[in-house]
Amino acid sequence: MTSDTIVIIPTYNEIESVDKMVDAIFALPQIFDILFIDDNSPDGTAKKIKEIQAFYPDRIYLEERPGKLGLGTAYIHGFKWAIAKNYPMIVEMDCDFSHDPKDLVRLREASLNGSDLVIGSRYVPGGKVKNWPMKRILMSYFASVYVRLILWISLKDTTAGFKCYKKEVLQKIQLDNITFKGYAFQICMKYAALKHGFKVKEIPITFIDRLYGESKMSTGIFKEAFWGVWKMKKMKL
């Protein structure tokens, strides 16, 4: 461990971006370690990560899984790994540069200043979305409205996937009970943190539509989130 913060980045066919992501994170004034979770990418992403890892064996880590098992399960795998390594702060982010690596510094600072879960939010004052069609922006925004109404929470960006957890949050949440894979996973983790009484803070970010690779979005992910919020109300989290 060279840092107090590990950045967990799931990958599936992200060979175009992994080296650029490493360069961007390692250029920051604060030291962050990186854990990649690769789901047997057919494009050779894991091999590329290993090549980079050879230069930074104490800062880059790789966990390989046998196939595409879903974003939620990848993060839970990473959370358990990070807890075992005793990282005080654990970040989740995408590899496609929709999340700006420079914002890692602000997420970490907010966590150090007392927040248990810090969310990079598109929908608080100062937050923005770039390069998305208006239809998708509206769909995302009203999805958060729907979630707030069902779960009775006040978060503005309920589906956000750029977050910094204190280790204690992830130790308290019943991770094995969360089987969602997409947006529902992101919603459920925030809901669980709030249910346990942790301090959750949203900070504004600019979300940019992916710069590299292809979207993993599907109709099934939307359906899982739509019905999943009703299941969350009854789950032991």
Image: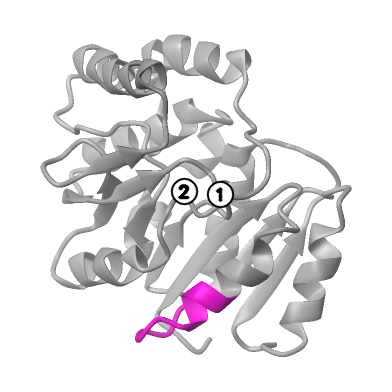
- Which mark is nearer the camera, 2 or 1? 1
Disc 2 crowd rating (10 Å Cα; few below 14, some 14-19, many 20+) is some
Q: Nearer the viewer, residue 163 or 150?
A: 163
Residue 49 percent coordinates (x, y): 75, 70
Q: Is label 1 in a helix, a strand or a loop?
A: loop
Identify the disc placed on residue 182.
none
Q: Is residue 203 above or below residue 17?
A: above
Residue at mark 2 to residue at mark 1: CA–CA distance:
7 Å
Amino acid at pointer 2:
Ser
Q: Residues within 10 Å of mark 1 (few under 14, many from 20)?
A: few
- Residue nearest the observer in this picture, 101 or 229: 101
Above or below for 199 versus 28: above
Q: Is residue 129 left or right of residue 14?
A: left
Residue 98 numbered tag: 2
Q: Amino acid at mark 1?
A: Leu
Residues marked 2 and 1 touching at CB (< 8 Å): yes
Which of the two discs, 2 and 1, labels the residue nearer the N terminus? Answer: 2
Percent of width and height locating residue 121: 26, 44
Q: Secondary structure at mark 2?
A: loop
Magenta stretch holds residue 12: no
Q: Is residue 22 visible?
A: yes
Q: Is residue 26 left or right of residue 78?
A: left
Q: Residue at x 25, y 67 (%)?
A: 106
Label at residue 211: 1
User: Which quadrant does the C terminus fall into?
Assistant: top left
Identify the residue at horizontal 53%, vertical 57% (top origin): 79
Q: Based on the displayed image, in which of its 4 quarters is residue 195 positioned?
A: top left
Magenta span of residues:
23-33
Colour option used: one colour
Q: Position of residue 213 (x, y in %)?
A: 68, 45
* Residue 197 % position (x, y): 18, 44
